[in-house]
Image (tube, rainbow, N blue to C red):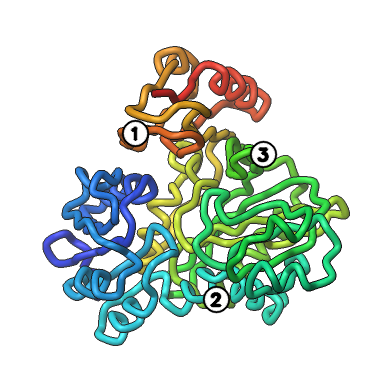
Amino acid sequence: MKNKWKAKDFKLGVLGGGQLGRMLIQEAIDLDIHLHMMDPDPNAPCSLIAHSFICGSITDYDSVMNFGRDKDLITVEIENVNIEALEELEKNGVIVYPQPSVLKIIKDKGIQKNFYLENNIPTAAFKLYADASAVAKDEIKYPIIQKTRTGGYDGKGVQLLKTAHASFDTPNLCEELVDFDKELSIIVARNKKGQIKCFPSVECEFNPEANLVEYLFSPAAISIDIEEKANAIAADLIQKLDMVGLLAVEFFLCKDGSLLVNEVAPRPHNSGHHTIECCGTSQYAQHLRSILNLPLGETKLLQPGAMINLLGEKGFSGPVIYDGLDRILELPGVYPHLYGKSETKPFRKMGHITITGESLTQVREIADQVKEKIKVKA
């Protein structure tokens, strides 16, 4: 790459053009980096603001090959991409970060979990199954958590399984129900030089119906010892993957104080949105620094923060209306980020709101008000 990332010399391709890519573009502008995006949705959030945008399938071999041939570097906004094409592009001299070898491990949750076992990364006990009939034939102590091995995102492909009759009829894994106290996230970055930095811990609260993050705050209400252990596991994991880029590591903090890795995402993540306002370097700027092999930025938390996902309200589908946007802008430390999606539907991520303040107590109080004042309707 020879440190040529200036727009006239360097083409950076991104597979995926959703809200994560939109926020990546906003950081890329400050470094005069032109991002070239491909997404299957012609109206994707990046479609109007990327340096160039192609509507195409990111899971189709030929589409990814055609998109990537003239790029100097390719990164991803989502891990469900055609890895075989990325492997071929890599052989042909295109730099791909995170590497196809890493994406291959993470894309399949079964391979991902086996990687944890082989590399002494703590995780919940699990077993792999070919289909629903294989689950039904096995002697399983219910309830358990079942996950499809590929294709799941934003709560899709994950369910609490009380009997085998509700089982996913695809390759899946079943893991024991963890008696946890909190769900945490650590975002860690690594560049080609091997420099590693972690962002401060995040505590997540999930929407029980949609099974996706509804609310988070940072720093998490945990001890320094647990924070250090989580950072050490995240750093160990990205190093053992030999990954270049940004990795979000989701943890269960068990009631006995132990930490278990739940899942990882090899890209900017929902649990890192608050870093735009709350940290010295945002997760998006850090992702760019890591894949360009630049020095990693300062991750120190400048102020406590919370993030609320703006989800489409139940019972509403159609052209989006942000009901209450004016009311939340009256509150101090409130930063809305709308994703440019014209159509809403139940539980669709339409934006997020970051709340900052002098203390977590203040942040929580304002966040509670924000959650009541704004609704995404049609």
Label 2 element class: loop
Type of amino acid under label 1: Glu
Q: Is residue 43 shown to the viewer in this render?
A: yes
Real-space Cα distance between discs 3 and 1? 23 Å
Q: In the rendering, at what x and y percent does residue 85 appear? A: 32, 78
Mark 1 vs 2, N-terminal side: 2
Circle 1 residues within 10 Å: few <14, some 14–19, many ≥20: some
Q: Quadrant of the N terminus?
A: bottom left
- The answer to whether mark 3 and mark 1 are in CB contact below 8 A is no
Q: Residue at x 49, y 15 (%)?
A: 331
Q: Residue at x 54, y 33 (%)?
A: 308
Depth check, front residue: 51 or 53: 53
Mark 3 vs 1, N-terminal side: 3
The residue indicated by pointer 3 is 208
Label 3 element class: loop
Q: In the rendering, at what x and y percent does residue 74 appear? A: 30, 68
Q: Residue at x 40, y 22 (%)?
A: 322
Label 1 element class: strand
Q: Is residue 233 left or right of residue 88?
A: right
Real-space Cα distance between discs 1 and 2? 38 Å
The residue indicated by pointer 1 is 343
Q: Is residue 182 left or right of residue 54?
A: right
Real-space Cα distance between discs 2 and 3? 32 Å
Q: Which mark is residue 241?
A: 2
Q: In the rendering, at what x and y percent does residue 96 appear? A: 34, 73
- The answer to whether mark 1 and mark 2 are in CB contact below 8 A is no
Of discs 2 and 3, which sits in the foreground?
3
Depth check, front residue: 177 or 1: 177
Q: Is residue 225 shown to the viewer in this render?
A: no
Which residue in the rendered view is the most extreme toward the left? 8
Type of amino acid under label 2: Leu
